[in-house]
Structure formats: structure tokens, C-alpha cells
Image (tube, rainbow, N blue to C red):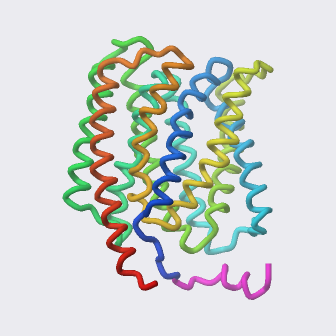
């Protein structure tokens, strides 16, 4: 890295925000990513049959970190953390650790279908949060209508099958659903902050920082609070490979790449493909009964996301038509 470039990293200069509404390519790419992310909760559920939540967390981060390092080496992206990057990286890492902990423990106490549907509400949270901290990403009447439908879907999923106390559907608990919902809210916040912070620094460096610190934290807590066990079951390692290489590696980097270049709400809300994808995989891989509450809730979430996505697409077309060729 040249001396001049290093000085640029160290400076506190303000960068021009070039984020814009998502057009056709980022939308299609995000739909593809959503199909992939739909299998995340299923793979976590499979791996938890063989290992504990914290152990699964740090093992997947190791694999994701290797993918991120390879990507940074390919781009010749510097690993060094500069002074003005310490604070944003610290904020992201703390949010990441808490969010993943909620996700894994929530997944351990509910079904893969429920966890996937609830975790997939992060675009709702991202849209609301972006309204307050991203000046060019405001809520509109159509976005609010979309959020109303999606929140109705969330409430239907959480309370129709799990009830207010105990377990009323096999494998579903209110505590597990609420932890999954909290994980989604933190993920929405983290993605919006990554979008902001990545305007001044490498998105890959942000991903690497959260994976490295996340690995150390979860490894320490796993040996402190759990009884880690290791096995060579093929099913376990396939699930771990999916979580680590596909999700924590490729998935994390791809999401960061998108939110750096496009307004957070206009790329994250297209994740409506995730719940149906996860539902089908949970039924096929784990033989989980979808349940009436889950199906009704998913329909409401999808309706809300389609309304939001249509509004975002129209905005993108208008913005692109104003840009001179």
C-alpha cells in the first residue's frame, strides 16, 4: 500500500455518499443471495444436533474468515486497521456477537422454519433504522404499508403457533421465537451501519474484523459455558461448510458489497425470498410441519415485501433516468 494511500486511510475527510436505489442487477443478485440464505437456519439446526450453539458459531466464523482473507488477498486489500477505523469496527463487532448469539440460541429453541421466517424480517428493521440515519433512504407511504403487512406476518408467526407461554407446537417456544426476532432487529441495524461505515473503509475489512473477534469470543465462551465435542459426521460438516463458506464467507461479503453501493432498504427488502426458501428446505431436509401460523405469516411478509420492492424499483428507474449518459 502506498504512503499516500495510507495517509488517506488515516485522514478524517468526508466521502461523497454515492449510494443509490437498487436497480435490476443488484435486485436479481439479492434474490439469488436470498435463496442461499434460506438454507442458513436449516444448516444451523442440523449442526446443533451434533454440537452446541457457541461451538457452532466459532467454527463457522473460522471458515468464513478464511474466505474473507482469500478475497482480500485477491483484491490486495490492506488488513491493517487505521486509527479512524477502530470505533466503527468496535461497534460492528459488538452488534455482530450479540446478534449471532441470539440467532444460535433462538434456533436451538424453535424450529428451523420459524427461525428462518423471523430472522428474515431484518429488512423491516433495516428500512425503519435507515429512515433515521441515512438521509437519502427515507420511509414513504408505500414503505410504511409494506412494513405493516410484514409486522402482521411476524406477529402471526410468533403468537399463532407458539402462544404466549410454553410450547404449544412441537419444537416451537416463545423464547426461541423472540430471540430470533431480536437477532433480526440487530442484523437490520448492523447492515445499515455497515452501509454507512463502508463509505469510508473497505467492506471486506469490516467482515474480517467481526469474524476474527467473533471467533475468539465464541471460542472462549464455548469452553467456559459449554462442553465442546468434536465428531466427523458427514452431515455435521456439510452443514458447517454451508454456514461457514457459503454464508459467513460468500454471503456476508456479498451483502456488504451491496449495502455499500446501494441504499440499504432497497436491497435488503428483496429478501422476501428467504422465508419461502427456508420453509421448503426445512420441510425437505428436516421434515418439519410448516404450521398454519407460519404459512399465514409468510404470506403477509411476502405481500409487504413485494409492495416495498415495487416502490423501490420505481424509484430506481426514476433516479437512473435523471443520470446523464
Give the residues drawn in magenta, as a range: 1-14
Q: Residue at x 57, y 83 (%)?
A: 12
* Quadrant for the N terminus in the image: bottom right
Q: Is residue 283 left or right of residue 272?
A: right
Q: Quadrant of residue 200?
A: bottom right
- Any part of residue 182 in sight: yes
Relative height, residue 166 to residue 113 (above, below): above
Q: Residue furthest bottom?
A: 4
Q: Residue at x 35, y 68 (%)?
A: 317
Between residue 248 and residue 89, name the one nearer to us: 248
Specify whether residue 12 is painted magenta: yes
Q: Is residue 151 left or right of residue 40?
A: left
Specify whether residue 157 is painted magenta: no
Place of residue 133 in the rendered image (x, y in percent of width and height, measured from the top left): 37, 66
Q: Is residue 110 left or right of residue 151?
A: right
Place of residue 250 in the rendered image (x, y in percent of width and height, measured from the top left): 65, 49
Q: Quadrant of residue 5?
A: bottom right
Q: Quadrant of residue 171?
A: top left
Relative height, residue 283 to residue 195 (above, below): above
Q: Residue at x 33, y 25 (%)?
A: 295
Between residue 233 and residue 231, name the one nearer to us: 233
Q: Residue at x 71, y 28 (%)?
A: 238
Between residue 157 and residue 274, name the one nearer to us: 274
Place of residue 194 in the rendered image (x, y in percent of width and height, measured from the top left): 52, 61
- Any part of residue 179 in sight: no
Relative height, residue 280 to residue 103 (above, below): above
Amino acid at each position: 500500500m502506498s504512503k499516500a494511500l495510507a495517509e488517506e486511510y488515516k485522514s478524517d475527510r468526508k466521502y461523497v455518499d454515492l449510494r443509490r436505489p437498487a436497480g435490476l442487477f443488484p435486485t436479481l443478485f439479492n434474490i439469488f443471495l436470498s435463496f442461499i440464505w434460506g438454507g442458513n437456519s436449516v444448516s444451523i439446526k442440523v449442526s446443533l444436533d451434533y454440537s452446541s450453539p457457541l461451538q457452532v458459531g466459532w467454527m463457522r466464523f473460522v471458515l468464513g474468515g478464511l474466505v474473507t482473507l482469500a478475497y482480500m488477498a485477491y483484491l490486495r486489500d490492506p488488513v491493517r486497521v487505521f486509527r479512524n477505523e477502530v470505533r466503527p469496527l468496535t461497534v460492528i463487532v459488538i452488534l455482530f456477537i450479540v446478534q449471532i448469539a441470539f440467532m444460535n440460541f433462538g434456533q436451538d429453541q424453535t424450529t428451523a422454519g420459524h427461525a428462518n421466517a423471523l430472522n428474515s424480517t431484518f429488512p423491516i428493521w433495516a428500512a425503519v433504522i435507515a429512515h433515521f440515519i441515512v438521509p437519502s433512504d427515507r420511509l414513504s407511504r408505500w414503505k410504511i404499508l409494506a412494513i405493516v403487512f410484514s409486522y402482521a406476518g411476524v406477529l402471526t408467526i410468533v403468537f399463532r403457533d407458539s402462544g404466549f407461554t410454553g410450547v404449544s407446537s412441537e419444537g416451537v417456544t416463545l423464547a426461541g421465537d423472540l430471540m430470533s426476532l431480536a437477532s433480526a432487529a440487530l442484523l437490520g441495524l448492523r447492515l445499515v451501519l455497515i452501509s454507512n461505515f463502508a463509505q469510508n473503509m473497505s467492506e471486506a475489512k469490516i467482515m474480517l474484523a467481526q469474524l476474527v473477534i467473533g471467533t475468539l469470543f465464541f471460542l472462549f465462551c464455548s469452553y467456559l459455558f459449554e462442553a465442546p465435542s468434536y465428531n466427523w459426521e458427514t452431515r455435521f460438516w456439510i452443514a458447517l461448510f454451508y454456514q461457514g463458506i457459503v454464508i459467513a464467507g460468500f454471503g456476508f461479503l456479498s451483502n456488504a458489497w451491496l449495502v455499500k453501493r446501494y441504499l440499504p432498504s432497497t436491497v435488503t427488502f428483496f429478501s422476501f425470498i428467504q422465508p419461502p426458501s427456508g420453509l421448503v428446505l426445512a420441510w425437505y431436509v428436516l421434515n418439519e410441519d410448516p404450521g398454519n401460523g407460519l404459512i399465514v405469516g409468510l404470506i403477509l411478509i411476502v405481500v409487504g415485501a413485494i409492495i416495498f420492492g415495487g416502490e423501490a424499483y420505481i424509484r430506481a428507474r426514476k433516479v437512473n433516468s435523471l443520470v446523464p449518459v
